[in-house]
Image (tube, coloured by chain):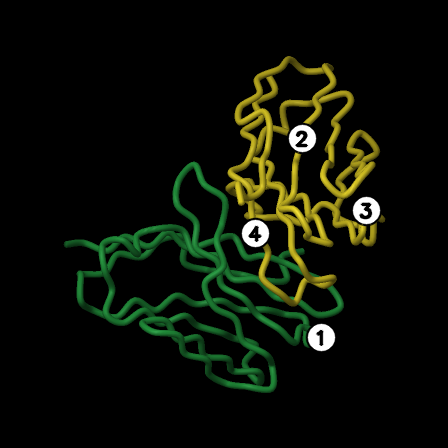
Chain colours: A green, B yellow
Amino acid sequence: DQQVKQNSPSLSVQEGRISILNCDYTNSMFDYFLWYKKYPAEGPTFLISISSIKDKNEDGRFTVFLNKSAKHLSLHIVPSQPGDSAVYFCAASGNQFYFGTGTSLTVIP
Amino acid sequence: DAGVIQSPRHEVTEMGQEVTLRCKPISGHNSLFWYRQTMMRGLELLIYFNNNVPIDDSGMPEDRFSAKMPNASFSTLKIQPSEPRDSAVYFCASSPWRTTYNEQFFGPGTRLTVL
């Protein structure tokens, strides 16, 4: 049972444009959400997080939005850079902890 | 700090053999996590420890899988006997916090292939 879903396996964006990565969850007990970035042959690295008491958290070019009623969160990267090309995982924590399946982002120079 | 260290980086074995994956967490971190990554299921949490004590092993797929943390600087994940469907990348992560609400620091992973 996949409680955290990233329905887009891949995404391609032109350099300088906005990248939007989406994540949906089913468990209403999740109250903290995290995004990780993963390069090939490396472990994931933490990017940004958000608590369920907020609907937005921003860190430089990265912003995470949370819509609790829709059980949906998104990661916005503006402007996108070629170095952002990686696999992005969302994760949800609460009474349980789950990662999504990941979205592979390619930023085209 | 060297970060989380995992060994081996690659392991190829035959079905039925015992496999042991090793992890050295970042010094001073209280929590240690084992994950399995596959294309179909993404990153799955298998088990995590707080202060060397297993807290949640509900993600361990079968009795063939076992994990130990004999001290704060070492953990093992063992598969016995191994099967082809165990082929995946296994990650170890550590954290200075006690919960899954906070950032985890991942090792580079062990790519396991069971023939």
Vertical position of residue B108 compared to residue A83: above or below: above
Name the residue beneath numbered marker 4.
Answer: B105
The residue that disc 1 covers is A29
Instruction: Look at 61% across and 66% down and name the residue there.
Output: A92
Label 3: state its secondary structure.
loop
Mark 2 highlights which residue? B22
Give the residue type at disc 2.
Arg
Q: Which residue type does callout 4 highlight? A: Phe
| Structural crowding at the residue carrying mark 4, measured as other residues with C-alpha within 10 Å and reported as few (<14), some (14–19) or many (≥20) | many
- To which quarter of the image does residue B89 belong? top right
Mark 1–mark 3 distance (CA, rounded to whole Å): 27 Å
Residue under the point 62% across and 57% down:
A2
Residue type at mark 3? Asn
Which of discs 1 and 4 lies nearer the camera? The answer is: 4
Return the x and y of residue B52 as percentages of the image width and height: 81, 46
Q: Quadrant of residue B6?
A: top right
Q: Position of residue A51 (x, y in %)?
A: 59, 79
Q: Residues within 10 Å of mark 2 (few under 14, many from 20)?
A: many
First reached walking from the N terminus: tag 3 or tag 4: 3
Q: Say which of marks 2 and 1 sits in front.
A: 2
